[in-house]
Image (cartoon, helix red, strand yellow):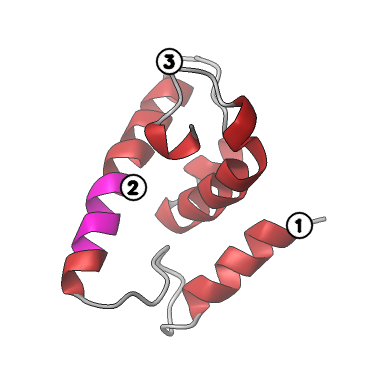
Amino acid sequence: MQKPLFVAYSLLDLENGSTDGAPPLENNAAYRSLARVFSTNYADFKHRLEDGRKTLLDPFAATNPAEFIAVATETSLRETETAPPEAPRSLR
């Protein structure tokens, strides 16, 4: 069963016509900022998995950038209060 927050983010992502991990945003600068932050964190997440390190996110998030942002959104809403100090700032 998919989690409601994951599904909600996936539906927001679809609003601009594609499932690319980016919901509709105000302008190109906002898209560039989103891309920069999530590209960095996606790469770090995949390296952690490859190294066999424990992660806060479900490994399914490594499927592709769109899944990563959906799983990260869900996790951040659920885990903000309990995120460990080494978690990305977006989860603290």
Quarter-of-image position of residue 57:
top right
Magenta-colored stretch includes residue 47: no
**Around disc 2, counting alpha carbons within 10 Å, would you say few (fewer than 14), some (14 to 19), or many (20 or more)?**
some
The magenta-colored residue range is 31-37
Earlier sequence position, callout 1 versus callout 2: 1
- Amino acid carrying label 1: it is Gln
Q: Residue at x 42, y 31 (%)?
A: 45
Residue 71 sits above or below residue 57 on the image: below
Query: Seen in the image, is 82 located left or right of residue 89?
Result: right
Query: Badge 1 is on which residue?
Result: 2
Residue found 25% across the figure and 66% down from its top: 31
Q: Residues within 10 Å of mark 1 (few under 14, many from 20)?
A: few
The residue lying toward the viewer, choosing from 34 and 82, is 82
Q: Please tell me which of labels 1 and 3 falls first in the chain.
A: 1
Q: Is residue 27 above or below residue 52?
A: below
Q: Nearer the viewer, residue 3 or 84?
A: 84
Q: Which mark is residue 51?
A: 3
- Residue at image mark 2: 38
Residue 27, x across and y down, in percent: 22, 77
